[in-house]
Image (tube, rainbow, N blue to C red):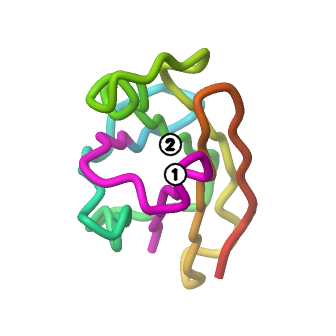
Amino acid sequence: MISTHILDTNLGKPAAHVEVKLFHAETHELIATATTNPDGRVGDFEITDFAKGAYQLEFEIAPYFSSQQIKTFFPRVCIQFFVEDVNQHYHIPLLISPFAYSTYRGS
């Protein structure tokens, strides 16, 4: 399973209503699209054909900041990661602010 959440460190709250796309990193084939819930989370992309390999999450954060009339330097954040064991849960959190972002492997 792959999940994610976004925290707006500028405001100290979850980033709701952000579009997130999941791709195969090597082919750039779109696998799934989701929108973060009010708690800034996508709990599961509901992938039925989950395989070992490289994936990429793309977070469309420009509309999120624009809705608050805040300019951002990073309109889209792309995070590539590798799935080694399909039986594990891969949680990829994203921390954003208008001029910075960071990520890590969550649990």
Mark 1 falls on what kind of element?
Answer: loop
Residue at position x 47%, y 62% in the image: 13
Q: How many marks?
A: 2
Image position of 44 (left or right of 14):
left
Mark 2 falls on what kind of element?
Answer: strand
Residue 92, relative to residue 56: is it above or below? below
Give the quadrant of the C terminus: bottom right
Residue 51, relative to residue 44: is it above or below? above
Give the residue pinned by disc 2.
Answer: 57
Q: Position of residue 3 (x, y in %)?
A: 45, 67
Image position of 1 (left or right of 52):
left
* Number of the label disc, if any, that sits on residue 78: none
Instruction: Choose between 68 and 45: the one closer to the eye.
Output: 68
Q: Position of residue 35 (x, y in %)?
A: 24, 50
Residue at position x 34%, y 34% in the image: 64
Give the residue pinned by disc 1.
Answer: 11
For the residues labelled 2 and 1, say whether their Cβ atoms are less than 8 Å apart. no
Residues rendered magenta in the picture: 1-21
Q: Quadrant of residue 92?
A: bottom right
Residue 24, relative to residue 38: is it above or below? above
Type of amino acid at the residue the image marks with label 2: Leu
Q: Position of residue 106 (x, y in %)?
A: 67, 73
